[in-house]
Amino acid sequence: MCCSSFDGENYQEPVKAGLWDAGSIKGMRFFDPHVHMTSRTTDDYQAMFDAGVVALIEPAFWLGQPRTGIDSFRDYYSSLVGWERFRSSQFGIKHYCTIGLNSREANNEALAEQVMEILPLFIYKEGVVGIGEIGFDDQTAAEEKYYRAQLELAKEAGLPIQIHTPHRDKKRGTTRSMDIALEHGISADMVIIDHNNEETVKEVLDRGFWAAFTIYPFTKMGNERMVDIVKEYGPDRIMVNSAADWGISDPLAVPKTAALMKLRGISNEDIQLVTYANAIAAFGKSGQIDEADFEVIKTVDQSVKFEGNTVLRGGQQPRIDKSSIIIS
Amino acid sequence: MLQERKEFESLIHAIIGEHLATEAKQWLEEKAMLVREEKTASNLNLGFVTVPRKTGRQPVHITTDQQREIAEQIDGFSINGWPVDKLSRLWLLMQVNDSEKSIYINKIENLFKAAEMNELVALYASLPSFAYPEEWQLRCAEGIRSNIGNVLEAIMYHNPYPAKHLPEKAWNQLVLKAFFTDKNINSIIGVDERANKELASILIDYAHERWAARRTVNPHLWRLVSKFIDDTNFADIEKVFKIGDGTEKKAAALACYYSNFQPARQLLEQETGLTKDIEENKLSWTNI
């Protein structure tokens, strides 16, 4: 779950810089291992496809406000493996997801108990590449309880774990998340610690976990800082994501960061590790990712239907000409 | 209803009366009567949502005497700038029969669950007027998880409930969230009284994170560190004092002034001008 609230959380004036040039990374393939497509538009899917994003992971999170009943959870999980996956395929992008009870809503214990009961129905489904995003938000006792219960679930299912680290009291929350995972006998290489920054990265890498970085304006990492981190720590076990959601975020954060890395002299090989291959190596431990699928899905047939529905409306053409002033 | 709640209720009733047209007043009185008498929640549910349509949203104007009285009855509470629908909602909620605890709580909880934004604002701002105050801790903590600015402000600003009833962890989340969302720290009731070591240490970690990202740090952060300056964090205060910009330097000076840690006091002595400003109240946490 990320990041933005709509009340100017730490808002800073945008800095004018160079324009983004997709040409410099043409031909590269990207994997965004954390992006909440449910809150994005079809324009975003098309822009991601055009920029080289071939596959993505949508972690289950909260919806900006707390759910009040179990059916809302069931429908949400079901949409992640259903309609949203289909929608993504219609734009040529392979959609995976992680399933879990997010930390904020773990605080509603009565509901959390019911969610724990239905999670097994979803975590074994095809294309579910992990338990996520789980972990701490306020770092309450209830959050810890359901974090631990889901670690056990992941262990039993042999699935990777995608861990959301808290905004507030981040450093200690990150350490604690790792301590608890190890305490449950989970191997560090099955755990992706997300939303890292300069203050957390060293410990995460030293302890053998995967370190994910969210490139998200104002509240998390900027991509210039990301470039510095890759220069300092190298590309091993590091991955970049957009965590794009309903807040001011950028679904092109992964390709843009790749372009900036290229501009700042990082090798193509290292760029591919942090924007593609490492994420596949980590979440591929689920046995659910086959890179060959990325090619198959690119040949889009938007007239395909999902439960009788298509993304096309009334004889629409699959792609629209964005440069035209006429919308017909 | 407790005596002090009763007095507060009648004061609010009087203020609403000064602001509503006859028709709206009659509607509200009638709904209030039904809400007081009903076993189910149907009149409450209907009344609560309908309030703005009947009352309008004009701001409430109160005298300084009324203001003082409210702040005395519910410590530090303020309804300054409230629209009349919000105040009418608070009053309507006070009409819910509270003789049976679980029924009372369920009725109000159900309003929270179905609330839109303005309703949430009214509900959270009304927390200090609810019966069984100790029962609303989890609800208040849930509100602090909100990402909606107005809702957060309804809990954080001029609301005595959190400082009085939240356990330390939830209280710390409120203060942290206030920093994360650039809220006005001066409007949080009890912010200095409930400062604690744990919070100070989390805030210092946060300052380090901001510095690593080359972002600015809210000077009020040092206000909450002040009483807990020690060997482990003195270097940070020293850094802010020596290389901070004007406001940051003033913040560090204030932090040192209210600290009992000897090196911090000595650091402040280097700037007699700032000490003098603090002593003459030209420089304080409220006017920094």
Image (tube, rainbow, N blue to C red):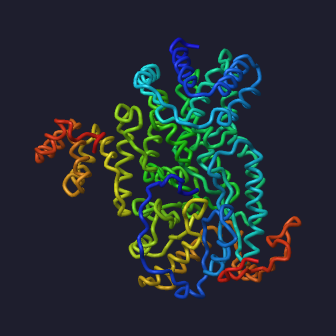
Residue B9 appears in view: yes
If the image is split into quadrants, where does the C terminus of chain B sit?
Answer: top left
Please state which of residues B37 and A152 is positioned toward the viewer in this rendering: B37
Please state which of residues A21 and A29 is positioned toward the viewer in this rendering: A21
From what the image shows, is residue A318 above or below residue A168?
below
Quarter-wise, where is residue A234 in the image?
A: bottom left
Identity of the residue furthest to the top in this view = B3
Please state which of residues B112 and A259 is positioned toward the viewer in this rendering: B112
Quarter-wise, where is residue A51 in the image?
A: bottom right
Residue at x 52%, y 19% (from the top left corner): B11
What is the x, y in percent for residue A321?
A: 70, 83
If the image is split into quadrants, where does the N terminus of chain B sit?
Answer: top right
From what the image shows, is residue A73 above or below residue B53?
below
From what the image shows, is residue A172 above or below residue A191?
above
Please state which of residues B254 and B84 is positioned toward the viewer in this rendering: B84
Identity of the residue furthest to the front in this view = B22
What is the x, y in percent for residue B24?
A: 66, 28
